[in-house]
């Protein structure tokens, strides 16, 4: 995987506006850039909340992504990265803030309704049906569709050729990286407006991680916004149009992937120097 291919990726679509947007997300002074979020295609805006009646995990947290972009959420263990993703997907109640998709406030919608609205979500674990074949897993991804989805399946097989070769094999027999491809492919079968990935490279080898990142870049080039939580912060920021560093459930730093990689404080605190 060559980072030289990433410089001009993404269509940088600025035509989608949201009159309800609150404006800009500012990084800490001197760090990153001021990131305009008023026109974001998907935004979790000023989110505060936690699980059930427990304490707040997110504190005024904002993350956003636009068509053709890859936005990554990084930070130390326990920073609230996956919680922020789940909040955007509706898996916990927000006590403050909102979630908007393509100009619509979806804060009150269930995760199932958000899928119907166009969210594709791939959790970190338990994200495939191990007893079903690869093709049956993909077919399960088309459960909300009433049209002919064979063309979409063909596109997914073009994106992940190994899945076509193993389409009649039980998904539980695949390697970790191949399972992740099945999970992403199944989410794409819904023809989502946005794709959300929670730790897509967890537990895979560096070679498989590079391959998965390459496929993620290919998906983003089709114009689908991608919001991704990643523990492999340096590698994720290398492919990111936007990066959000969370600390204790709050935005600590924000900027482009290049800016965050070049920032000495981010490098020292989160990237190993």
Image (cartoon, rainbow, N blue to C red):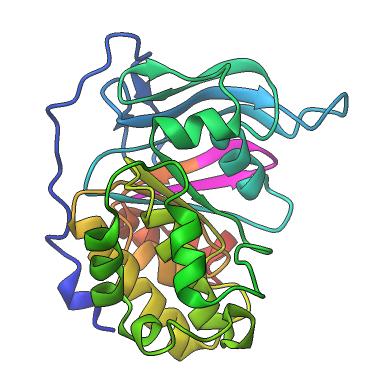
Residue placed furthest toward the right: 53
124 w.r.t. 80: above or below? below
Magenta span: 242-252
In the visual, does 226 lie left or right of 19?
A: right
The quadrant where residue 33 appears:
top left
Residue placed furthest toward the top: 19
In the rendered image, the quadrant that contains the N terminus is bottom left
65 w.r.t. 203: above or below? above
Q: Is residue 115 magenta?
A: no
The quadrant where residue 35 appears:
top left
Residue found at x 14% / y 38%: 13
Q: Is residue 248 magenta?
A: yes
Q: 71 or 91: nearer the eye?
A: 91
Is residue 148 visible in this depiction of the protein?
Answer: yes
Residue found at x 52% / y 28%: 113
Q: Main secondary structure of the magenta part?
A: strand
Residue found at x 58% / y 65%: 231
217 w.r.t. 69: above or below? below
Residue 189 position within the rendered picture, expressed as x and y whole percent measured from the top left: 37, 55
Residue 49 position within the rendered picture, expressed as x and y whole percent measured from the top left: 71, 25
Residue 54 position within the rendered picture, expressed as x and y whole percent measured from the top left: 87, 29
Is residue 32 visible in this depiction of the protein?
Answer: no
Residue 186 position within the rendered picture, expressed as x and y whole percent measured from the top left: 45, 60
Q: 36 or 170: nearer the eye?
A: 170
| Label tally | 0
In the visual, does 192 lie left or right of 82?
A: left
Residue found at x 50% / y 57%: 140
Q: 270 or 185: nearer the eye?
A: 185
């Amino acid at each position: 995987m060559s980072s030289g291919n990433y410089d001009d990726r993404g269509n940088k679509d600025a035509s989608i506006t949201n009159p309800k947007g609150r404006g800009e997300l500012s990084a800490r002074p001197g760090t990153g850039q001021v990131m305009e979020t008023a026109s974001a295609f998907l935004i979790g805006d000023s989110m505060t909340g936690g699980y059930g009646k427990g304490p707040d995990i997110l504190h005024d947290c904002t993350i956003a992504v636009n068509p053709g972009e890859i936005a990554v959420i990084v930070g130390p263990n326990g920073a609230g990265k996956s919680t922020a993703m789940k909040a955007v997907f509706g898996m916990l109640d927000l006590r403050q803030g909102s979630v908007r998709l393509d100009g619509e406030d979806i804060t009150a919608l269930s995760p199932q309704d958000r899928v119907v609205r166009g969210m594709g979500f791939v959790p970190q674990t338990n994200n495939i049906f191990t007893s079903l074949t690869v093709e049956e897993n993909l077919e399960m991804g088309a459960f909300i569709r009433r049209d002919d989805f064979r063309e979409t399946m063909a596109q997914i097989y073009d994106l992940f050729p190994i899945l076509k070769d193993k389409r009649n094999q039980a998904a539980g027999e695949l390697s970790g990286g191949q399972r992740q491809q099945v999970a992403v492919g199944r989410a794409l079968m819904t023809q989502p407006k946005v794709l959300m990935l929670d730790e897509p490279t967890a537990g895979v080898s560096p070679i498989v991680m590079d391959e998965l990142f390459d496929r993620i870049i290919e998906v983003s080039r089709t114009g689908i916004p991608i919001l991704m939580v990643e523990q492999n912060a340096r590698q994720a920021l290398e492919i990111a149009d936007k990066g959000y560093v969370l600390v204790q459930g709050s935005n600590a730093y924000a900027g482009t992937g290049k800016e965050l990689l070049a920032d000495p404080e981010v490098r020292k605190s989160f990237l190993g120097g």
